[in-house]
Image (tube, helix red, strand yellow):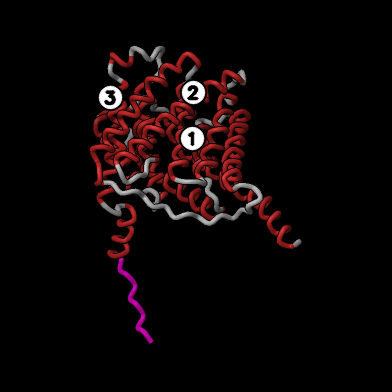
Amino acid sequence: MPAPQPRPGPAAMALARLEQVDPGAHRRVRGLRLVTAYGLAAMLGLMPQIEQHAGRNVSLSVIAASFALWASVSENRATRWESSRDLTLFCISAGLGAVSYILLVRLLHIGGPAELELPLVTGAFCVGYFKRFTPFSAGIGSQIFIGQLLAYTAGLRLDDISVILIATPIAVLAAVVPRLLSGPAEHPITVPAAATEFDDWIPVEFIMGLQAAAAALVIVALNGEFGLEKSSWAIAACTYVITNSTAATIARVRSRILGTMIGVPIAIACLPLAVEAPLVVWLAAALAMIVYAMALPERYDIACGAYAFALILTLAVSGENDFFELVARAWETIIGGALGMIAALLLRPVFARHRKSSAGS
Protein backbone atom coordinates (compact mmCIF):
# COMPACT_ATOMS: atom_id res chain seq x y z
CA MET A 1 0.00 0.00 0.00
CA PRO A 2 1.62 3.28 -1.06
CA ALA A 3 2.34 5.80 1.65
CA PRO A 4 0.03 8.83 1.67
CA GLN A 5 1.49 11.90 0.03
CA PRO A 6 2.18 14.77 2.44
CA ARG A 7 -0.02 17.83 2.03
CA PRO A 8 1.79 20.81 0.49
CA GLY A 9 2.71 23.52 2.95
CA PRO A 10 1.50 27.14 2.82
CA ALA A 11 4.59 28.25 0.90
CA ALA A 12 4.09 25.57 -1.78
CA MET A 13 0.40 26.45 -2.09
CA ALA A 14 1.24 30.15 -2.42
CA LEU A 15 3.79 29.39 -5.15
CA ALA A 16 1.25 27.23 -7.00
CA ARG A 17 -1.25 30.11 -6.98
CA LEU A 18 1.45 32.49 -8.16
CA GLU A 19 2.19 30.17 -11.07
CA GLN A 20 -1.45 30.48 -12.12
CA VAL A 21 -1.22 34.27 -12.17
CA ASP A 22 2.27 34.39 -13.71
CA PRO A 23 2.76 31.24 -15.81
CA GLY A 24 5.72 32.66 -17.71
CA ALA A 25 7.56 35.67 -19.03
CA HIS A 26 5.50 35.59 -22.24
CA ARG A 27 2.43 36.70 -20.26
CA ARG A 28 4.34 39.66 -18.86
CA VAL A 29 5.43 40.59 -22.37
CA ARG A 30 1.80 40.36 -23.46
CA GLY A 31 0.75 42.66 -20.63
CA LEU A 32 3.40 45.19 -21.55
CA ARG A 33 2.21 45.06 -25.15
CA LEU A 34 -1.37 45.84 -24.08
CA VAL A 35 -0.23 48.89 -22.13
CA THR A 36 2.06 50.01 -24.97
CA ALA A 37 -0.71 49.72 -27.56
CA TYR A 38 -3.09 51.77 -25.38
CA GLY A 39 -0.52 54.45 -24.66
CA LEU A 40 0.66 54.71 -28.27
CA ALA A 41 -2.89 55.08 -29.61
CA ALA A 42 -3.75 57.64 -26.91
CA MET A 43 -0.65 59.67 -27.74
CA LEU A 44 -1.34 59.61 -31.50
CA GLY A 45 -4.95 60.60 -30.91
CA LEU A 46 -3.83 63.67 -28.95
CA MET A 47 -1.54 64.99 -31.68
CA PRO A 48 -2.91 68.39 -32.79
CA GLN A 49 -2.43 67.58 -36.47
CA ILE A 50 -4.70 64.55 -36.08
CA GLU A 51 -7.10 65.71 -33.36
CA GLN A 52 -8.16 68.79 -35.34
CA HIS A 53 -9.85 66.52 -37.88
CA ALA A 54 -11.97 64.81 -35.23
CA GLY A 55 -14.78 67.37 -35.40
CA ARG A 56 -16.67 68.28 -32.26
CA ASN A 57 -15.64 67.59 -28.69
CA VAL A 58 -15.22 63.81 -29.01
CA SER A 59 -12.26 62.05 -27.43
CA LEU A 60 -10.49 60.57 -30.44
CA SER A 61 -7.66 59.54 -28.14
CA VAL A 62 -9.86 57.41 -25.86
CA ILE A 63 -11.66 55.72 -28.76
CA ALA A 64 -8.47 54.83 -30.63
CA ALA A 65 -6.73 53.66 -27.45
CA SER A 66 -9.69 51.46 -26.48
CA PHE A 67 -9.85 49.92 -29.96
CA ALA A 68 -6.14 49.06 -29.76
CA LEU A 69 -6.26 47.80 -26.17
CA TRP A 70 -9.13 45.35 -26.58
CA ALA A 71 -7.89 44.19 -29.96
CA SER A 72 -4.61 43.31 -28.24
CA VAL A 73 -6.51 41.47 -25.50
CA SER A 74 -8.37 39.33 -28.07
CA GLU A 75 -5.34 38.58 -30.27
CA ASN A 76 -3.95 35.08 -29.75
CA ARG A 77 -1.56 34.00 -32.50
CA ALA A 78 1.97 32.60 -32.60
CA THR A 79 3.49 34.50 -35.53
CA ARG A 80 3.90 38.20 -36.25
CA TRP A 81 2.02 37.97 -39.55
CA GLU A 82 -1.02 36.18 -38.13
CA SER A 83 -1.11 38.48 -35.10
CA SER A 84 -0.85 41.61 -37.25
CA ARG A 85 -3.62 40.37 -39.51
CA ASP A 86 -5.93 39.59 -36.57
CA LEU A 87 -5.17 42.88 -34.83
CA THR A 88 -6.04 44.79 -38.00
CA LEU A 89 -9.33 42.92 -38.40
CA PHE A 90 -10.18 43.37 -34.72
CA CYS A 91 -9.67 47.14 -34.91
CA ILE A 92 -11.76 47.31 -38.08
CA SER A 93 -14.48 45.26 -36.34
CA ALA A 94 -14.52 47.75 -33.46
CA GLY A 95 -14.89 50.59 -35.95
CA LEU A 96 -17.73 48.77 -37.69
CA GLY A 97 -19.38 48.15 -34.33
CA ALA A 98 -19.25 51.87 -33.53
CA VAL A 99 -20.70 52.74 -36.94
CA SER A 100 -23.45 50.13 -36.52
CA TYR A 101 -24.43 51.72 -33.21
CA ILE A 102 -24.72 55.17 -34.81
CA LEU A 103 -26.76 53.82 -37.72
CA LEU A 104 -29.10 51.82 -35.48
CA VAL A 105 -29.77 54.88 -33.34
CA ARG A 106 -30.55 56.85 -36.49
CA LEU A 107 -32.68 54.17 -38.17
CA LEU A 108 -34.71 53.36 -35.05
CA HIS A 109 -35.20 57.06 -34.19
CA ILE A 110 -33.96 56.42 -30.68
CA GLY A 111 -33.92 59.42 -28.35
CA GLY A 112 -34.54 58.49 -24.70
CA PRO A 113 -31.61 57.83 -22.33
CA ALA A 114 -32.53 54.17 -21.82
CA GLU A 115 -33.47 53.65 -25.48
CA LEU A 116 -29.94 54.65 -26.49
CA GLU A 117 -28.76 51.35 -24.99
CA LEU A 118 -30.97 49.21 -27.21
CA PRO A 119 -28.36 48.80 -29.99
CA LEU A 120 -26.00 47.31 -27.38
CA VAL A 121 -28.31 44.28 -27.26
CA THR A 122 -27.21 43.38 -30.80
CA GLY A 123 -23.57 43.66 -29.75
CA ALA A 124 -24.22 41.45 -26.73
CA PHE A 125 -25.71 38.84 -29.04
CA CYS A 126 -22.59 38.99 -31.23
CA VAL A 127 -20.34 38.35 -28.22
CA GLY A 128 -22.29 35.26 -27.18
CA TYR A 129 -22.77 34.00 -30.73
CA PHE A 130 -19.19 34.30 -31.99
CA LYS A 131 -17.63 33.07 -28.73
CA ARG A 132 -18.69 29.53 -29.60
CA PHE A 133 -16.40 29.11 -32.62
CA THR A 134 -12.72 30.09 -32.34
CA PRO A 135 -10.69 32.65 -30.36
CA PHE A 136 -10.53 34.72 -33.56
CA SER A 137 -14.31 34.76 -34.01
CA ALA A 138 -14.73 35.50 -30.30
CA GLY A 139 -12.46 38.51 -30.77
CA ILE A 140 -14.54 39.74 -33.72
CA GLY A 141 -17.76 39.53 -31.69
CA SER A 142 -16.15 41.20 -28.70
CA GLN A 143 -14.77 44.07 -30.78
CA ILE A 144 -18.17 44.74 -32.37
CA PHE A 145 -19.64 45.11 -28.89
CA ILE A 146 -16.68 47.22 -27.70
CA GLY A 147 -17.18 49.56 -30.66
CA GLN A 148 -20.87 49.92 -29.88
CA LEU A 149 -20.14 50.50 -26.20
CA LEU A 150 -17.60 53.22 -26.96
CA ALA A 151 -19.98 54.92 -29.39
CA TYR A 152 -22.69 54.87 -26.72
CA THR A 153 -20.52 56.21 -23.90
CA ALA A 154 -18.99 58.91 -26.13
CA GLY A 155 -22.40 59.93 -27.47
CA LEU A 156 -21.31 59.58 -31.09
CA ARG A 157 -23.71 60.80 -33.77
CA LEU A 158 -23.90 60.46 -37.54
CA ASP A 159 -21.52 63.36 -38.11
CA ASP A 160 -18.94 61.66 -35.86
CA ILE A 161 -18.29 58.79 -38.25
CA SER A 162 -15.19 60.69 -39.33
CA VAL A 163 -13.86 60.22 -35.79
CA ILE A 164 -14.21 56.46 -36.16
CA LEU A 165 -12.54 56.53 -39.57
CA ILE A 166 -9.55 58.31 -38.02
CA ALA A 167 -9.47 56.25 -34.80
CA THR A 168 -9.44 52.88 -36.59
CA PRO A 169 -6.14 53.20 -38.49
CA ILE A 170 -4.54 54.81 -35.41
CA ALA A 171 -5.63 51.77 -33.40
CA VAL A 172 -4.29 49.38 -36.05
CA LEU A 173 -0.89 51.07 -36.01
CA ALA A 174 -0.74 51.22 -32.22
CA ALA A 175 -1.74 47.56 -31.83
CA VAL A 176 0.42 46.08 -34.59
CA VAL A 177 3.75 47.84 -33.87
CA PRO A 178 4.17 46.46 -30.29
CA ARG A 179 3.26 42.98 -31.52
CA LEU A 180 5.91 43.18 -34.23
CA LEU A 181 8.46 44.18 -31.61
CA SER A 182 7.48 41.47 -29.10
CA GLY A 183 7.95 38.81 -31.78
CA PRO A 184 8.57 35.22 -30.62
CA ALA A 185 8.62 36.26 -26.95
CA GLU A 186 4.84 35.71 -26.90
CA HIS A 187 3.06 32.38 -26.91
CA PRO A 188 -0.57 31.81 -27.89
CA ILE A 189 -2.90 31.07 -24.99
CA THR A 190 -4.54 27.65 -25.16
CA VAL A 191 -8.11 27.62 -23.91
CA PRO A 192 -9.70 24.16 -23.43
CA ALA A 193 -13.07 23.77 -25.12
CA ALA A 194 -15.98 23.54 -22.70
CA ALA A 195 -18.52 20.77 -23.10
CA THR A 196 -21.89 21.96 -24.35
CA GLU A 197 -25.19 21.24 -22.62
CA PHE A 198 -27.44 21.97 -25.58
CA ASP A 199 -28.91 19.69 -28.21
CA ASP A 200 -27.94 19.94 -31.86
CA TRP A 201 -31.44 20.88 -33.01
CA ILE A 202 -30.66 24.55 -32.28
CA PRO A 203 -27.12 25.88 -32.76
CA VAL A 204 -25.26 26.35 -29.50
CA GLU A 205 -23.93 29.70 -30.64
CA PHE A 206 -27.47 30.99 -31.15
CA ILE A 207 -28.44 30.02 -27.60
CA MET A 208 -25.36 31.73 -26.16
CA GLY A 209 -26.13 34.88 -28.15
CA LEU A 210 -29.75 34.75 -27.03
CA GLN A 211 -28.74 34.44 -23.38
CA ALA A 212 -26.44 37.47 -23.58
CA ALA A 213 -28.99 39.53 -25.53
CA ALA A 214 -31.85 38.63 -23.18
CA ALA A 215 -29.88 39.65 -20.09
CA ALA A 216 -28.81 42.90 -21.79
CA LEU A 217 -32.41 43.67 -22.77
CA VAL A 218 -33.56 43.24 -19.17
CA ILE A 219 -30.87 45.71 -18.04
CA VAL A 220 -32.07 48.23 -20.63
CA ALA A 221 -35.60 47.83 -19.26
CA LEU A 222 -34.40 48.23 -15.67
CA ASN A 223 -32.51 51.37 -16.59
CA GLY A 224 -35.61 52.81 -18.23
CA GLU A 225 -37.70 52.02 -15.17
CA PHE A 226 -35.35 52.81 -12.30
CA GLY A 227 -32.43 54.73 -13.82
CA LEU A 228 -29.26 52.75 -13.12
CA GLU A 229 -26.08 54.70 -12.45
CA LYS A 230 -23.86 53.03 -15.08
CA SER A 231 -26.06 50.47 -16.80
CA SER A 232 -23.55 49.94 -19.63
CA TRP A 233 -21.24 48.32 -17.06
CA ALA A 234 -24.02 45.89 -16.14
CA ILE A 235 -24.59 45.09 -19.82
CA ALA A 236 -20.87 44.37 -20.28
CA ALA A 237 -20.88 42.13 -17.20
CA CYS A 238 -23.86 40.03 -18.30
CA THR A 239 -22.45 39.75 -21.81
CA TYR A 240 -19.00 38.45 -20.97
CA VAL A 241 -20.01 35.87 -18.35
CA ILE A 242 -22.00 33.79 -20.84
CA THR A 243 -20.44 30.48 -21.90
CA ASN A 244 -21.80 27.26 -23.44
CA SER A 245 -22.03 25.62 -20.01
CA THR A 246 -24.24 26.69 -17.11
CA ALA A 247 -21.63 25.61 -14.59
CA ALA A 248 -18.93 27.61 -16.38
CA THR A 249 -21.24 30.65 -16.58
CA ILE A 250 -21.91 30.49 -12.84
CA ALA A 251 -18.18 30.15 -12.17
CA ARG A 252 -17.45 33.22 -14.32
CA VAL A 253 -20.18 35.20 -12.57
CA ARG A 254 -18.71 34.31 -9.20
CA SER A 255 -15.19 35.18 -10.30
CA ARG A 256 -16.22 38.47 -11.92
CA ILE A 257 -18.18 39.62 -8.88
CA LEU A 258 -15.46 38.54 -6.44
CA GLY A 259 -12.69 40.24 -8.40
CA THR A 260 -14.68 43.45 -8.85
CA MET A 261 -15.66 43.60 -5.18
CA ILE A 262 -11.95 43.47 -4.26
CA GLY A 263 -10.57 45.68 -7.04
CA VAL A 264 -13.03 48.57 -6.64
CA PRO A 265 -12.46 49.25 -2.90
CA ILE A 266 -8.68 49.12 -3.34
CA ALA A 267 -8.91 51.61 -6.19
CA ILE A 268 -11.19 53.91 -4.20
CA ALA A 269 -8.71 53.85 -1.32
CA CYS A 270 -6.10 55.14 -3.80
CA LEU A 271 -8.27 58.00 -5.09
CA PRO A 272 -6.43 60.76 -3.17
CA LEU A 273 -3.40 59.96 -5.32
CA ALA A 274 -5.40 60.91 -8.43
CA VAL A 275 -5.08 64.56 -7.42
CA GLU A 276 -1.74 64.52 -5.64
CA ALA A 277 0.22 62.15 -7.89
CA PRO A 278 -1.55 61.41 -11.21
CA LEU A 279 1.59 59.87 -12.73
CA VAL A 280 1.70 57.33 -9.91
CA VAL A 281 -1.95 56.51 -10.59
CA TRP A 282 -1.31 55.96 -14.29
CA LEU A 283 1.62 53.70 -13.42
CA ALA A 284 -0.55 51.70 -11.00
CA ALA A 285 -3.26 51.35 -13.65
CA ALA A 286 -0.68 50.17 -16.19
CA LEU A 287 0.66 47.57 -13.76
CA ALA A 288 -2.90 46.42 -13.10
CA MET A 289 -3.48 45.87 -16.82
CA ILE A 290 -0.27 43.84 -16.99
CA VAL A 291 -1.62 41.67 -14.17
CA TYR A 292 -4.90 41.45 -16.10
CA ALA A 293 -3.10 40.03 -19.14
CA MET A 294 -1.05 37.65 -16.99
CA ALA A 295 -4.08 36.25 -15.14
CA LEU A 296 -6.27 35.51 -18.17
CA PRO A 297 -7.77 32.99 -18.70
CA GLU A 298 -6.78 30.79 -15.74
CA ARG A 299 -7.58 33.31 -12.97
CA TYR A 300 -10.60 35.23 -14.21
CA ASP A 301 -11.25 36.57 -10.70
CA ILE A 302 -7.82 38.21 -10.47
CA ALA A 303 -8.15 39.56 -14.01
CA CYS A 304 -11.52 41.14 -13.20
CA GLY A 305 -10.16 42.64 -10.00
CA ALA A 306 -7.15 44.09 -11.81
CA TYR A 307 -9.32 45.57 -14.54
CA ALA A 308 -11.78 47.09 -12.06
CA PHE A 309 -8.85 48.64 -10.18
CA ALA A 310 -7.39 50.09 -13.40
CA LEU A 311 -10.77 51.36 -14.61
CA ILE A 312 -11.63 53.22 -11.41
CA LEU A 313 -8.19 54.83 -11.22
CA THR A 314 -8.19 55.95 -14.86
CA LEU A 315 -11.70 57.39 -14.52
CA ALA A 316 -10.64 59.29 -11.40
CA VAL A 317 -7.44 60.69 -12.90
CA SER A 318 -9.42 61.70 -16.01
CA GLY A 319 -11.69 63.88 -13.89
CA GLU A 320 -14.62 61.61 -13.01
CA ASN A 321 -14.49 61.93 -9.24
CA ASP A 322 -18.12 61.25 -8.32
CA PHE A 323 -17.83 58.69 -5.52
CA PHE A 324 -21.19 57.00 -6.10
CA GLU A 325 -20.57 56.72 -9.83
CA LEU A 326 -17.23 55.02 -9.22
CA VAL A 327 -18.68 52.68 -6.59
CA ALA A 328 -21.43 51.83 -9.07
CA ARG A 329 -18.85 49.65 -10.81
CA ALA A 330 -19.35 47.12 -8.01
CA TRP A 331 -23.12 46.91 -7.86
CA GLU A 332 -23.60 47.20 -11.63
CA THR A 333 -21.29 44.20 -12.00
CA ILE A 334 -23.38 42.29 -9.46
CA ILE A 335 -26.59 43.16 -11.33
CA GLY A 336 -25.15 42.25 -14.72
CA GLY A 337 -23.52 39.05 -13.52
CA ALA A 338 -26.66 37.93 -11.73
CA LEU A 339 -28.84 38.57 -14.78
CA GLY A 340 -26.38 36.72 -17.01
CA MET A 341 -26.55 33.73 -14.67
CA ILE A 342 -30.36 33.89 -14.54
CA ALA A 343 -30.52 33.98 -18.34
CA ALA A 344 -28.33 30.87 -18.50
CA LEU A 345 -30.42 29.08 -15.87
CA LEU A 346 -33.79 29.97 -17.39
CA LEU A 347 -33.05 29.52 -21.09
CA ARG A 348 -31.00 26.32 -20.87
CA PRO A 349 -33.83 24.08 -19.47
CA VAL A 350 -36.03 24.98 -22.47
CA PHE A 351 -33.62 23.16 -24.78
CA ALA A 352 -32.75 20.49 -22.22
CA ARG A 353 -36.43 19.52 -22.02
CA HIS A 354 -36.56 19.10 -25.78
CA ARG A 355 -33.55 16.82 -25.63
CA LYS A 356 -35.15 14.68 -22.90
CA SER A 357 -38.46 14.46 -24.69
CA SER A 358 -36.70 13.48 -27.92
CA ALA A 359 -34.76 10.78 -26.08
CA GLY A 360 -37.96 9.48 -24.48
CA SER A 361 -39.77 9.17 -27.79
Q: Residue 277 at x, y = what percent?
A: 24, 30
Compared across the picture, whether 219 is left or right of 150 comes to: right
Q: Is residue 92 a member of the stretch shown in magenta?
A: no
- Which quadrant of the view contains residue 274? top left
- Residue at the (35%, 42%) spot, across then down: 266
Tally of numbered tags:
3
Q: Residue 1 at x, y = what percent?
A: 38, 87
In the rendered view, tell whether residue 337 sits above or below residue 325.
below
- The residue under label 2 is 99
Give the residue type at disc 3. Met
What kind of secondary structure does the magenta stretch mostly adopt? Answer: loop
Give the residue type at disc 1. Trp
Gap in angstroms between the C-alphas marked 1 and 2: 20 Å
Name the element at disc 2.
helix
Going from the N terminus, do you reach mark 3 or mark 2 first? Answer: 3
Q: Residue 21 at x, y = what percent?
A: 33, 52
Gap in angstroms between the C-alphas marked 3 and 2: 23 Å
Q: Which quadrant of the rendered structure holds the C terminus?
A: bottom right
- The residue under label 1 is 233
- The residue under label 3 is 43
Residues shaded magenta: 1-10
